[in-house]
Image: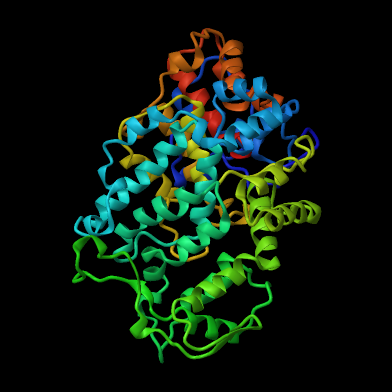
Amino acid sequence: MTSQTSPSLEPAAVPAGPIDPVSADAAAAPLQPVPRRRSRRDLLTGVGAALSAMWAATREVRAGPLSSARWLAERISFGPTEAEYALADSLGYEGYLEYQLDHTAIDDSALQTRLSGLTTLGMQPFELVSLPSGQVRNELIEAAILRAVYSPRQLYERMVEFWNDHFHTDAGEGINGQLRTVDDREVIRAHALGRFPDMLAASAQSPSMLYYLDNVTSVAGNPNENYPRELLELHTLGVTGGYTQQDVVELARCLTGWGMWNANANPVNIRWTFRYNSATHDNGAKTVLGTSIPAGGGMNDGLTVLGILMNHPSTAAFIAGKLCRRFYGESPPQTLIDAVATAYTSTGGDIKAMLRALFLNVDPQTAPIKYKRPFHLMMSALRQSGAAITTTGALRTQLQLAGQLPFRWPAPDGFPDTLDAWVGLILPRWNFGASLLNSNISGSSVSINTLLAGANTAELVMSRIDAALFGGAMPADQRERIRQYLLPDPPTDARKREAVGLAIASPEFQWH
């Protein structure tokens, strides 16, 4: 990957403490020689200028290329720990891929112990709806954070994130604050490394989805087109997949009566679960995507169309393209998309087969780098610094400031996966490392002695930072600027903390 470069970003000064937006522009200045002994203010300004220089212009991505196995560990995780790098090294590229694909064989009992206090995760809809939506939603977000940071099933958790974007519903809308927990558990997590058709069918009967996209109000004579349109555009065929407005209209008729039981249903345990109501279904004849659907089909009308969509070549191509953009880059070669689409078609939508086709058809040494979305950036900082997390309220605030609080994107297309969508909101990203290392994020802490393993010189500290955060491949210019900041030897604990925070704010850590 030595020849790959990142798009030029607007440089700005990055002090070791959280940035004051008013003073950030004033601090951006050419790097100047500084005396050996400096005041605290001088230190901040000097480091800000140093990191400003790091961020200016196009740069080499790596001091040296990561091994293929280490590239894979970076690409399919929320940030590889040193233990994860070592595991990838020992198993090799294909061995590590298969290890992560066989996710149920990976022991995650320690994570389950951490999650045991989040009692809403296992509750049924009628139980959840009786609780405040904020409580349920916050536990769901907390679980997403803890799973990303602590789960050894890293590829599985990345795929859960991917599908939660693909089948997105906003947990801030009405009772979806409670129903989203069931959707995450029974639609996404149940099928994230299974078969896409099974997940699509589960989503089509998810009260969270049907409520969010108004299908619960869709009845004969007054069909609602919101869910049918997104089913075609976002979930299966894609906007260029070959459907027409008339297909949307006819599909809406097929899905009339697909909704959920209300608060008065008996027995109690069926409340807020999926319901097909034959009394409100349009039983007339329909035609969708050129297929005639005879009158009197009932619920089979919707099931028939789902079957068409699951097996449609546009669905294979659309899902393949999204997977390639998430795990390869924004502009994947068509040959790669075709290989993944072929895997979909030949296996009936087996997700593991698609991922094998993706990763076994790329050259890690020439693959483009990817800009970390805010959630990925913060989770990688927590994972690779060895952070201990006791509460997540402050982390939720950090994610909200950065624009990616899980389950809270306001549109059904899910959080965007492009550089342009995220590159403008930079201050929360720069501040996160400094805040984390200086114990300014309540409930999250980093042991600097554990992370740096007793390193007591600038060079040894930088070697530890490089190994923990960059797999030993931090660009030489960025490494040297932070090493200079650590001088004179021996660096103080405060200086060490600031150096780790600066490494997290560095250009290299923004990418994977």
All told, the count of numbered labels is 0
Q: Can residue 34 be seen at all in this image of the molecule?
A: no
Quarter of the picture holding the C terminus: top right
* Residue 223 x %, y %: 43, 85
Q: Would you place residue 41 above or below residue 200 in this image?
A: above
Quarter of the picture holding the N terminus: top right
Q: Would you place residue 116 above or below residue 397 in this image?
A: above
**Closer-to-camera residue (432/16):** 432
Please name the residue shown 53% across and 70% down the image. Answer: 231
Q: Quadrant of residue 92?
A: top right
* Residue 328 x %, y %: 69, 46
**Closer-to-camera residue (77/484):** 77
Please name the residue shown 38% across and 79% down the image. Answer: 257
Q: Quadrant of residue 158?
A: top right
* Residue 496 x %, y %: 49, 18
Residue 174 falls left or right of residue 228: left
Residue 234 falls left or right of residue 437: right
Q: Can residue 201 be seen at all in this image of the molecule?
A: yes
**Closer-to-camera residue (509/109):** 109
Residue 148 falls left or right of residue 99: left
* Residue 47 x %, y %: 55, 29
Coloring applied to the structure: rainbow
Q: Would you place residue 83 above or below residue 189 in this image?
A: above
Q: Quadrant of residue 386?
A: top left
Please name the residue shown 73% across and 37% down the image. Answer: 59
**Closer-to-camera residue (344/73):** 344
